[in-house]
Image: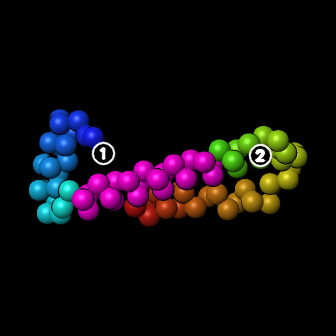
Amino acid sequence: MTIDESLLQQVDETVEELQTTRSAFIRKALEQALSGYQLRRLEERDEAGYMAVPAEAGETDEWITEQDWVSAWNEAK
């Protein structure tokens, strides 16, 4: 694997701050990148599904009260 010197320098500085190893840091970064990629693929699949079969008018009305949690959560902060 080839890594640009300036990027490797940033990794080494961060590794030192985190008191970990270069390998552990890169392994974690790759795991996070792969997880993010998988999540984006699932979201794209869901979006395509909803675009192909859109909800009918009123179909989700019974769930409208369930989305109010954000306001309550923000008020509790």
Question: What residue is rendered at 17% in x and 55% in y?
Answer: 15
Check the image and report above or below for 36 versus 3: below
Residue count near mark 2 (Cα–Cα under 10 Å), binned few <14, some 14–19, many ≥20: few
User: Residue 30 magenta-drawn?
Assistant: yes
Q: Indicate the amino acid at tag 1.
A: Met
For disc 2, the marked residue is 50
Q: Position of residue 72 (x, y in %)?
A: 53, 61
Residue of label 1: 1
Q: How many C-alpha atoms fall within 10 Å of the one at disc 1: few (<14), some, or many (≥20)?
A: few
Which is nearer the eye, 45 or 25?
Answer: 25
> Quick check: 30 left or right of 63?
left
Task: Give the percent coordinates (x, y) of residue 53.
Answer: 85, 45
User: Per the image, is 47 magenta?
Assistant: no
Q: Which residues are magenta?
A: 23-43
Distance between the alpha carbons at the discs numbered 1 and 2: 40 Å
Q: Quadrant of residue 64?
A: bottom right
Under circle 1, the secondary element is loop
Amino acid, disc 2: Tyr
Where does the image place residue 74, in percent across and percent down from the top left?
46, 57
Identify the residue at the far front of this view: 1
Q: Disc 1 or 2, which lies upstream in sequence?
A: 1
Between 41 and 27, the residue placed more toward the observer is 27
Q: How many marks?
A: 2
Q: Residue at the spot x=56%, y=47% of the render?
A: 40
Q: Is residue 27 left or right of residue 41?
A: left
Which mark, residue 46? Answer: none
